[in-house]
Image: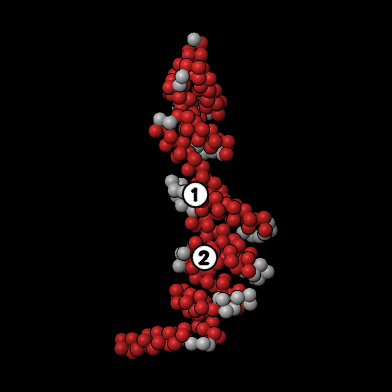
């Protein structure tokens, strides 16, 4: 039985190569589609890659582009999959899969979005593409999911901004830390990190004031008090109050001098 199985596999491989090298495009198309249906995406791609240019602009060309994108998606090559999904929407905007492909193109960018510590170019790209999908198909059933994906991407950008602020703080670059944290508050006023950010801003302004030239000290001690008041206003029971209370008192003392 093993020998028979090996003979069948060998014959299938020979037959597959024969079709691949033949001039019969109809047979190539049917073979590629059959391989796709069987889940052999890498082999199917060899046929699709040969045929896309030949059938470009036709109904069969649309199918080839669509299934090419699906092959790459199934093999988790989201960058190339996204490229072909986008190409489908550009070349065949009125075809049956245009809406789906516009969403999947954006979804591929979402899947390519890295963890917060890394460069977030893909995250911004995904946000832009998801918004484009929502604007183009506002009544789509996928709009709700697209908005959920955008929320996750924004959370990632928010986390990155928070970590950048903390990194500057730990490095002792208090001016950069303050700028980063204040930008975070401007961009994400309801941030989950708000309590921690207000704490870091308070301490950073105080330490920054201490290191400042005399004529700048007063302004930065005032900012310390202001940041402290914001923390107390928004989080009167904050675990940080006890620590920054002393900082606030010291800052006020300096302002009275």
Is the Cβ of the residue at disc 2 closer than 8 Å to that at disc 1? no
- Front-lying residue, 193 or 166: 166
Q: Is residue 16 left or right of residue 145?
A: left
Residue at coordinates 59% horizontally, 78% vertically from top-left?
A: 55
Residue 78 drawn at (x, y percent): 49, 62
Question: Could you classify mark 1 by the number of other residues whose Cα lies within 10 Å: few (under 14), some (14-19), or many (20 or more)?
Answer: some
Q: Is residue 131 above or below residue 160?
A: below
Q: Which residue is mark 2?
A: 81
Question: Could you classify mark 2 by the number of other residues whose Cα lies within 10 Å: few (under 14), some (14-19), or many (20 or more)?
Answer: many
Does any portion of residue 212 appear in the rendered image? yes
Label 2: which secondary element: helix
Label 1: which secondary element: loop
Residue at coordinates 40% horizontally, 30% vertically from top-left?
A: 172
> Most extreme residue toward the top, as rendered?
257
- Front-lying residue, 235 or 98: 98
Q: Is residue 232 above or below residue 146?
A: above
Residue at coordinates 47% horizontally, 29% vertically from top-left?
A: 175
Residue at coordinates 53% horizontally, 57% vertically from top-left?
A: 109
Q: Which residue is mark 1?
A: 120
């Amino acid at each position: 039985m093993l020998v028979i199985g090996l003979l069948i596999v060998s014959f299938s491989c020979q037959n597959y190569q024969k079709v691949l090298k033949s001039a019969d495009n109809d047979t190539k198309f049917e073979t590629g589609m059959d391989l796709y249906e069987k889940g052999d995406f890498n082999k199917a791609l060899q046929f699709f890659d040969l045929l896309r240019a030949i059938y470009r602009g036709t109904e069969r060309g649309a199918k080839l582009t669509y299934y090419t994108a699906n092959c790459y998606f199934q093999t988790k090559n989201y960058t190339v999959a996204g490229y072909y999904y986008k190409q489908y929407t550009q070349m065949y905007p009125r075809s049956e899969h245009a809406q789906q492909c516009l969403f999947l193109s954006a979804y591929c960018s979402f899947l390519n979005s890295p963890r917060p510590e890394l460069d977030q170019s893909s995250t911004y790209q995904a946000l832009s593409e998801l918004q484009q999908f929502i604007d183009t198909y506002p009544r789509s059933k996928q709009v709700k999911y697209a908005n959920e994906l955008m929320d996750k991407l924004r959370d990632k950008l928010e986390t990155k901004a928070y970590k950048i602020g903390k990194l500057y703080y730990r490095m002792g670059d208090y001016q950069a830390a303050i700028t980063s944290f204040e930008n975070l508050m401007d961009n994400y006023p309801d941030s989950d990190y708000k309590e921690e950010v207000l704490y870091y801003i308070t301490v950073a302004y105080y330490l920054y004031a201490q290191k400042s030239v005399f004529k700048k000290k007063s302004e930065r001690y005032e900012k310390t008090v202001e940041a402290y008041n914001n923390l107390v206003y928004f989080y009167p029971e904050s675990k940080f109050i006890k620590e920054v209370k002393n900082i606030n008192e010291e800052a006020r003392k300096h302002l009275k001098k």
